[in-house]
Image: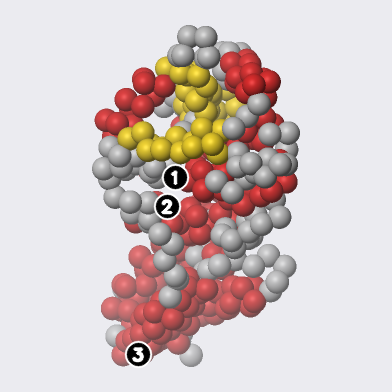
Amino acid sequence: MTMLPGEIFWERFGHDAIVVVDPATREATSYNFGFFDLDEPDFTSRFIRGDMRYRLVALPVDQDLAVYEAEGRGVSIQWLDLTAEDARQLAVALAENARPENARYRYDYFLDNCSTRVRDAIDRALHGRLRSQLEGRSQGNTHRGEAMRLASPDFWMWLGFDVGLGPAADKPLPLWDEAFVPMRLSTALRDVTHPDGRPVVRREHEVLPHRLQPEPRERPQRWWLWALCGLAIGGALAWAGRRHPRVTTALAVPFWTLCGVVGTLLLFLWFGTAHRFAWGNHNLFLLSPLAWLLLPGAVRLLRGRPPGTWFNRALALVAAVAAIGLFAHWLPLAPQRNAHWIALLLPVHLGLLAGLRRR
């Protein structure tokens, strides 16, 4: 059973569950891997550290559907063509997994979430045929692309994914890994077959209509528009810095402060959390805590005093580190899709260097 995206940030990726119908009682049970408790004493700290705990819950399918109906989210169901024994073993395994002592698991947004748990359970019921048919095929999608696409209705969520994800999020995904998105798993299942050629999905139909905005489509990243903005801002700062250094410095101080704050957060995600897809983030070249070294000289400039020799050196250092980010983008070792941020921010750093550097 696949649920389309909702409006709250944790609903943006959609959701899914496995429905089991008891042939004796005709009772339908939804096995839903997406439950978490915001009221847990350590939930926030675990979320920050990347050590979240989710759990599997078995509940009547009508009760599960009532939540999505109230939210206006569309739901579709795919009935799987399994042998009686495979279906029985899957039902027994899910019931055992849903026991309180077995239900909790360590959640990972990309590698171990509600959709990958459904995918893995179906793969075991198909004796590995799901993975074998999806592993070698790819559409070129990435974790970053899928995350940004689905987060795009919420600007701050979209921005957080784009700035916060490192190069690990930019590797092309096989369809197997792409199934961390429930809608992608549903689409992939339609092409999976048994050894004799029979489709695994016996039939499919809509259970609830979708009353919200449709699932977002991927939009191309026009880095050249970012470059035009970056060049315009950088050129204006270089011109204004020579003629109106105090005004330019007043504009630069919030930018340098933001660079330091964001850079410190990226370092914390890298060295202080288990959010592995944020490690080694190349945006650190552009949003560096080194920018804080410029603040003492900036205060002196704002007071009409010489900023000092160290200010010149710090300006050159911050701009040089940003330029290194451009070369790192070309390296094939750990490429990161941040050309648009380089195109926007590198000219700004160079413009401030040209405008505020004093001989």
- The disc labelled 2 sits on which kind of residue? Leu
- The disc labelled 1 sits on which kind of residue? Phe
Judged left or right of residue 162, residue 250 is left
Of the two numbered discs 1 and 2 on the same chain, state the one appearing first in sequence: 1
Image location (x, y in percent) of residue 328: 64, 73
- The disc labelled 3 sits on which kind of residue? Trp
Image location (x, y in percent) of residue 294: 46, 70
Can residue 15 be seen here?
no
Eye-nearest disc, 2 or 3: 2
Q: How many marks?
A: 3
Q: Is residue 265 above or below residue 301?
A: above
Image location (x, y in percent) of residue 278: 58, 52
Secondary element type, mark 1? loop
- Label 1 with label 2: CB-CB less than 8 Å: yes
133 or 284: nearer the viewer:
133
Secondary element type, mark 2? helix
211 or 97: nearer the viewer:
211
Question: Label 1 belongs to which residue?
Answer: 13
Label drawn at residue 150: 2
Eye-nearest disc, 3 or 1: 1
The answer to which quarter of the image holds residue 317 is: bottom right
